[in-house]
Image (cartoon, rainbow, N blue to C red):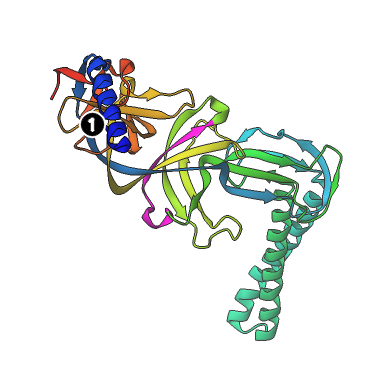
Amino acid sequence: MKQSHLAITLLTLFFSLSACKEPAIETTKALPKIKVVVASPTQTQRSVAIDASGELEAIKTTSIGFQVPGKVVDVCIQEGEAVKKGQLLARLEAEDFKNELDIAEANLLEATDHHKRVYPLFQSGAVTEKEYILAHAALLRARAARNIAAKKVKETQLSAPISGLIGSKDVELGQSVSVGSPLLSIVKTDRIFARVSVPESEIGILRCGQKAQVSIKAFDGKIFDGSVSIIGAVAEPRTRSYPVKIRIENPELLLRTGMIANASILTHAPITHLSVPGHAIVRDPDNLSYLFVVDKTGKMALKKRVTPQGLWRDKVIISQGLAPSDRIIVSGQHRLTDGQSIEIIKGS
């Protein structure tokens, strides 16, 4: 009996409290719609460009020296100077060689005269065949000796075998030199190579003749046109990259060996990329890049993390995070948050 009375009391109290409770007040307010302009990403097909770095090197370097010994009496050039093929570079004292040439000329004169007198006598039978052969052999020896002596005189003058720049100079006035000692080097640079390293993953799409643009740091990044001339057959063991040489015309000899070069090689492999206006990209405090895109309903903005890759004309290439079907917000995006309600006032 007591238990029934307690239950009735509790039920009465519950209903009394329920009747006194005020209705809940609606506190959630709808976020205001932000007016935006939308656009589709631009799809562009272009050839893949391979970026590589390296340095300039000469197409040809020639080391030269005197082919006769002697004392240097004249040096006509300085290191770094431009020279033309056949230009005089240095001279040796030539007096002794000229004297040897005079002796050789005299011996040749005697041998020629003797041969002229013996030949008709041999034809008439007045002298034996052996006497004629001796006279003819003496003439040949005298002629050869004269040619050797003349060559030695000529070799007292050192001339440029090619056009180019004097790369190194190891000869001074009064210096005694021996035969074949390398005294000068000439660097041929009217055409020059940019030697760059291309990774193994990209070497397969390179072909000789492909165009390249080479930026030279020494000239504040000035661009020089070139073409792929040599593709290395063996990878460098440490980097697994291949040496590639890009030939550049250098008629004014502005470019010099050792200059740092950054090359962009335009291949024939096509690639389709998506690009967006640069002002559509939003960056957060961590400098991460985002785009706001319209959801499927067309009423909400969604924040998408993207990866910019570089510039293409007046737009920014997006390598990751963007789909061709996305509708990106290009105006009003800086006032948006993820999930914000939007009203499209322009675009589709």
Vertical order, 13 against 57 (above or below): above
Q: Nearer the viewer, residue 294 or 76?
A: 294
The magenta stretch spans residue 300? no
Q: Position of residue 204 (x, y in %)?
A: 39, 58
Q: Position of residue 66 (x, y in %)?
A: 74, 51
Identify the residue at image location x=60%, y=75%: 120
Q: On the rendered structure, is 117 left or right of 252? A: right
Vertical order, 42 against 121 (above or below): above
Image quarter for residue 82? top right
Residue for badge 1: 41
Q: On the rendered structure, is 245 left or right of 314? A: right
Q: Nearer the viewer, residue 59 or 337?
A: 337
Q: Nearer the viewer, residue 30 or 115?
A: 30
Q: On the rendered structure, is 110 left or right of 285? A: right
Q: Nearer the viewer, residue 194 or 316?
A: 316
Where does the magenta region start and end? 202-216
Instruction: Give the farthest residue toward the front.
Output: 1
Q: Position of residue 126 (x, y in %)?
A: 65, 82
The magenta stretch spans residue 215? yes
| Amino acid beneath label 1 | Pro
Image quarter for residue 347? top left
Q: Residues within 10 Å of mark 1 (few under 14, many from 20)?
A: many
Instruction: Give the farthest residue toward the left.
Output: 348
Identify the residue at image location x=49%, y=62%: 233
Q: Position of residue 148 (x, y in %)?
A: 71, 60
Vertical order, 287 against 165 (above or below): above
Q: Quadrant of the C terminus?
A: top left
